Amino acid sequence: MNFPLSHETHHVQTLATGHVVPEPERCIQCGICSFNCPIGIDVRLHAWLGKPVADSYCLTCGECVERCPRGVLHFEKTGLFLEGKE
Ligand code: SF4
Ligand code: SF4
């Protein structure tokens, strides 16, 4: 069964609040993430170094997360977009 609306809703929330975080021990350095990033961020290097994609140009589009064959990448919420709302 398909739930396209709930998927989209989740995606929009991700766009608003997340950044990409790798689990380096799972990464095989295949480069699929970097290859599929629409703005050319070297996500593979971030995975190698175990560092979040803190690049301010990151669109949080989720392409790298979805394409990684090893499930290395996931979104983690940051407080960045919540500042000033409390
Ligand atoms: S796609 Fe996944 S396994 Fe491949 S380099 Fe990127 S993070 Fe590592
Ligand atoms: S979320 Fe999108 S823009 Fe950001 S690093 Fe991944 S593929 Fe590139």
Image: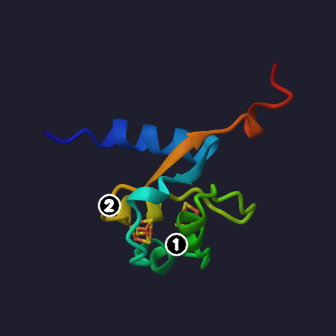
Callouts 2 and 1 close, C-beta under 8 Å = no
User: In the drawing, what numbered circle is on residue 44?
Assistant: 1
Which quarter of the picture shows residue 83? top right
- Left or right: residue 56 versus residue 66 is right
Residue drawn 46% across and 45% down?
A: 11
* Image quarter in which the C terminus is found: top right
Residue 3 x/y as whole percent:
25, 38
Residue drawn 32% across and 60% down?
A: 70
User: In the drawing, what numbered circle is on residue 65?
Assistant: none
Q: Nearer the viewer, residue 47 or 33?
A: 47
Residue drawn 72% across and 63% down?
A: 55
| Ligand 2, image quadrant it occupies | bottom right
Disc 2 within 8 angstroms of ligand 1 (CB)? yes
Please determine whether, in this image, residue 53 is positioned above or below residue 81.
below
Disc 1 within 8 angstroms of ligand 1 (CB)? yes
- Left or right: residue 53 versus residue 21 is right
